[in-house]
Amino acid sequence: MSTKNWPLWEVFVRSKSGLEHRHVGSLHAADAKMAMENARDVYTRRQEGVSIWVVPSSAITASNPAHSGELFEPAQDKAYRHPTFYDLPNELKHI
Amino acid sequence: MSLNIDRLEQEFQAKIDAGHNIEPKDWMPEKYRKTHIRQISQHAHSEIVGMLPEGNWITRAPSLRRKVALLAKVQDEAGHGLYLYSATETLGISRDELFEQLHSGKAKYSSIFNYPTLSWADIGAIGWLVDGAAIINQVMLTRTSYGPYARAMVRICKEESFHQRQGYEIMLTLCRGTQVQKDMAQDALNRWWWPSLMMFGPRDAESTHTEQSMKWKIKRKTNDELRQQFIDITVPQAEFLGLTVPDADLKWNEESGHYDFGEIDWDEFWQVVKGNGPCNKERLDARRSAYENGAWVREAAMAYADKQEQKRLAEVG
Ligand SMILES: [Fe+2]
Ligand SMILES: [Fe+2]
């Protein structure tokens, strides 16, 4: 009986204007319009949002945790990218 | 090869011990994955099947206020089921397989939903006791080690407290009403009390999964600890209603700082788990028929979506 399953969509919600959209979860829907309607019903029943994005899960490219080393370690020894790296006298203000 | 697995398992356990969450694409032991598929899907099925006993009373709610509240609660439970199915799917199992497991009886759901809702007071008792017991378990699970499960729990916990309050308000209204109404509330408590205690599962000594679940931080408290916590919280609420908890052995223990309580009928517990509860068949039949009778809708929606997509592609052609 079962034919093709409804694809998976990722849902992003902006909780109020001025804030970014945040990933809140996922759902199945036949198309974008249905995904939007379902996202409204599943993820914003209590005014949790003012804007919704739905994205086909298959469109997302994710980093592989097995490669986290190559990806993220290079930032570890670059303390000079942080303000505290620079030695300035304490009596100096507003800097 | 097995040396490699040993090392991965050690790293995995170290990560959990350090309080880090496990995310879908992280390496995990096969047993951790399987245990989670079983547990999260069982939780999802419980939310979905749990709509049935309450749905029974939506059309007969005594006022519009009660009706909109019950409708909203039941809709929330559908949402909870969806959050949890999504979390389960991150472990590499499809929604269809999960439904198949429910419908074939391979997967379980909480036995509490195999009891019938005989009167309006049962809706009060369910919100108060069943959602109350669920909250105790779910608050603990907001700190479970698997990220998607923990996040679903945070969302669910935010929504649950309304469920319990609407239930307690129903009980309170009945208890402040006529003698007949109060009797109805007492009768509901009599029938729902013991099954609610059973919701926490077998005693620690008989629970096969507890040790591993604690080590992997799937659970953070044992069945018996959670059950005791529920009893300690709930007994004073029953007293406030002026109702009697149907347990002759229930007694405050000054020394332990907890209530002592009587023996649970574990025979009944296992009978209902095995499928011999009053409504097991009815519940599964309802789920199966919803799934089967909805098949044509799912297919039509997909066919329509495909057609629209073809049209769009032809236009941009
Ligand atoms: Fe729920
Ligand atoms: Fe609930």
Image (tube, rainbow, N blue to C red):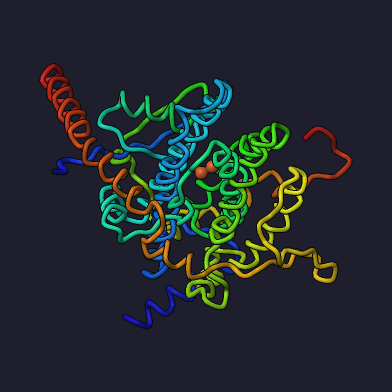
Q: Residue furthest front?
A: B180
In this view, B283 is above or below B107: above
Residue B14 visible at all:
no
Specify the quadrant of the image occupied by residue B308. top left
Q: Is residue A56 above or below residue B237?
A: above
Which residue extends farthest top? B315
Q: Quadrant of the N terminus of chain B?
A: bottom left
**Furthest-right residue in view?**
A91
Q: Which of B75 and B242 is in front in this view?
A: B242
Residue found at x 52% / y 39%: B119
Q: Can residue A88 be seen in this view?
A: yes
Q: In which quarter of the image is ligand 2?
A: top right
The quadrant of the rendering that contains the C terminus of chain B is: top left
Q: Position of residue B14 (x, y in %)?
A: 54, 71
Q: In this view, does B295 lie to the left or right of B287?
A: left
Q: Residue at x 86, y 44 (%)?
A: A90
**Looking at the picture, how far across and down is residue B179, in whole percent?**
69, 36
Q: In this view, does B252 lie to the left or right of B281?
A: right
Residue B10 left/right relative to B223: left
Residue at (50% x, 53% y) in the render? B147
Provide residue B272's location: percent of width, then percent of height.
42, 61
Instruction: Please name whichever residue, B106 or B183, is drawn nearer the observer in this view of the structure.
Output: B183
Q: Which residue is drawn at 17% across and 29% down?
A: B300
**Could you say which quadrant of the image residue B78 lies in?**
top left
In the displayed structure, B222 sits above or below A29; it is below
